[in-house]
């Protein structure tokens, strides 16, 4: 598991206030459920996971760059919690991959 995740706000993205406002529309568990629904046990690039998750969440997700950044933050949280595995630098969406851990 790669543990080099940095929240978007730490790199000049969303502020805590902006993130709280967005969370009024979506809960972390709703976003996590959508992310996990488009990932399997095979490696998949982060960029398409973000796009497919955005399509599932639809109008509940902010339309500007805040929407994909919010999904990316949740992918990082899922990696940190061990619910997803990552290879590569997940801040580079097109050059990194995620998958669910294989069931034992």
Image (cartoon, rainbow, N blue to C red):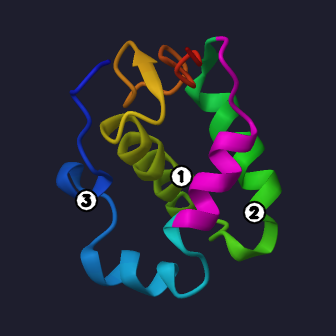
Point 77% across, 42% down: residue: 52
**39 over 52 or under it: above or below:** above
Q: In the picture provided, is 11 more to the left or to the right than 97?
A: left
Q: Circle 1 — which element?
A: helix
Label 3 packing within 10 angstroms: few (<14), some (14-19), many (20+): some
Q: Nearer the viewer, mark 3 or mark 2?
A: 2
Look at the numbered discs 1 and 2 and tell me whether their residues touch, using CB distance below 8 Å.
Answer: yes
Q: Earlier in the sequence, mark 3 or mark 2?
A: 3
Q: Which residues are magenta?
A: 29-42
* Residue under label 1: 71
Residue 29 occupies which quadrant of the picture?
Answer: bottom right
Of helix, strand and loop, which one carries label 2? Answer: helix
Give left or right: position of 75 versus 19: right
The residue sitting at 47% across, 42% down in the picture is 75
For the residue carrying disc 1, how many other residues have a C-alpha within 10 Å: few (<14), some (14-19), or many (20+)?
Answer: many
**Residue 9 disc label:** 3
In whole angstroms, how far apart are the C-alphas of marks 3 and 2? 22 Å
- Any mark on residue 27, and which? none
């Amino acid at each position: 598991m790669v543990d080099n995740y940095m929240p978007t706000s730490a790199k000049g993205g969303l502020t805590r206030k902006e993130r709280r406002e967005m969370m009024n529309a979506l809960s972390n568990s709703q976003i996590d459920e959508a992310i996990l629904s488009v990932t399997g046990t095979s490696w998949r690039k982060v960029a398409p996971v973000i796009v497919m998750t955005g399509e599932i969440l639809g109008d509940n997700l902010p339309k500007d760059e805040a929407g994909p950044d919010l999904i990316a933050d949740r992918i990082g949280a899922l990696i940190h919690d061990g619910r997803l595995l990552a290879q590569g630098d997940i801040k580079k969406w097109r050059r990194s991959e995620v998958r669910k851990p294989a069931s034992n």
